Image (cartoon, rainbow, N blue to C red):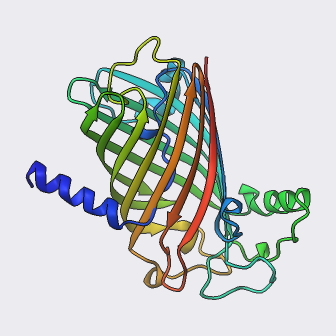
Amino acid sequence: MGYRLYTSILILLAATANGQAINNTLSYKNINSDKYFRFNYENDFFSGTDMYYTQGIHAELVTPSLKHFPLSKILVHPKYSYTKYGVAIEHNGYTPSSISSDAILYGDRPFVACLFLKTFRISVDTIKKQRFSSSISTGLMGQGAGGKEMQEGIHKWTSSITPHGWSNQICNDAILNYQVDYEKQLLYWNKIFAMDVHGMARIGTLSTKAALSTTLMLGYFENPFGTQAAKGPEFRIYAYEHPEVSVIGYDATLQGGSFNNTSPYTISSGNTTRAVFQNRFGFVVMYRKLYLEYFQSMHSSDFKTGNYHVWGGIQIAACF
């Protein structure tokens, strides 16, 4: 496929897609340092709902010393200009469209929570303007992930209704996932505008999928495909748009885990949606060593009897 046709297809996807999930290794999440801590919190409370993907908490650390972390050594990587190494702990919670019933809501999303460690590395080729990221996630889904306790605690703290239905959640199972991402910059103009394309492949017990997306950035920012400068501009601000289309092979948060088939309720393979559209739109402000982001994501239905879903979130990071 020629360069112009490839670009045109991605622009078309940007115009028709509906949303995108978090991936802190991508260019629009770039922090121009190899040492930082970042915290991410997202919740559909930002969109006035309490359903489906209801909450995500993600805390990550990036530092060169993680090069020697055992799981870092099994991550594939090209010989690019420089590489960052990181680990993250993530907790995600999923519920049906109502949490007021103790009975199983057939045709709706199952209750489930996931808790896992993500080990990742980001490699950047400053000459050919490309980025390659790889990650491995290891953890647990089900009762052991503590989704029931976390949601009940948050609702009690916020004086919200007591959640019902967690007794029907997907049972404990192992999480082992491997993912690779490739990005190629197409346009970059004067620290004001950038465009790139992105491809992703993931396989494992939690999720198996492939995705194609594009990113548009507008504002004042450093080139995420450029040299990792020792000191960049003190103030940066930009907005980004990241639409994505995914093809889903397996989703354990709907279908249940790979090893434990005793869950009281799951969505069958035939009732899942194989093509999913997402869109993520956000604003980023960076001042000296601080990073602040607010975003909104919209996601088309994961299963045939479901609806689209909208949530929002914030990210805070600090370099050291």
Q: Is residue 22 above or below residue 32?
A: below
Image quarter in which the C terminus is found: top right
Identity of the residue drawn at 39% across and 67% down: 248
Query: Residue 137, how many percent across, how many down?
Result: 52, 46
Q: Residue furthest left?
A: 2
Query: Residue 265, how many percent across, how many down?
Result: 64, 81
Q: Is residue 304 above or below residue 176?
A: below
> Is residue 81 or residue 15 the one in the foreground?
15
Identity of the residue drawn at 87% across and 71% down: 161
Q: How many marks?
A: 0
> Is residue 150 or residue 66 the one in the foreground?
150
Q: Which of the 4 image quarters holds residue 166? A: bottom right
In-image side of 189 versus 282 (left or right): left
> Is residue 305 or residue 8 the one in the foreground?
8
Query: Residue 79, how many percent across, how many down?
Result: 27, 24
Query: Residue 131, how many percent across, how many down?
Result: 32, 34
Image quarter in which the N terminus is found: bottom left
Say if residue 25 shows up in the picture.
no
Identity of the residue drawn at 33% across and 37% down: 193
Say if residue 232 shows up in the picture.
yes
Q: Residue furthest top?
A: 230
> Is residue 258 or residue 81 the one in the foreground?
81
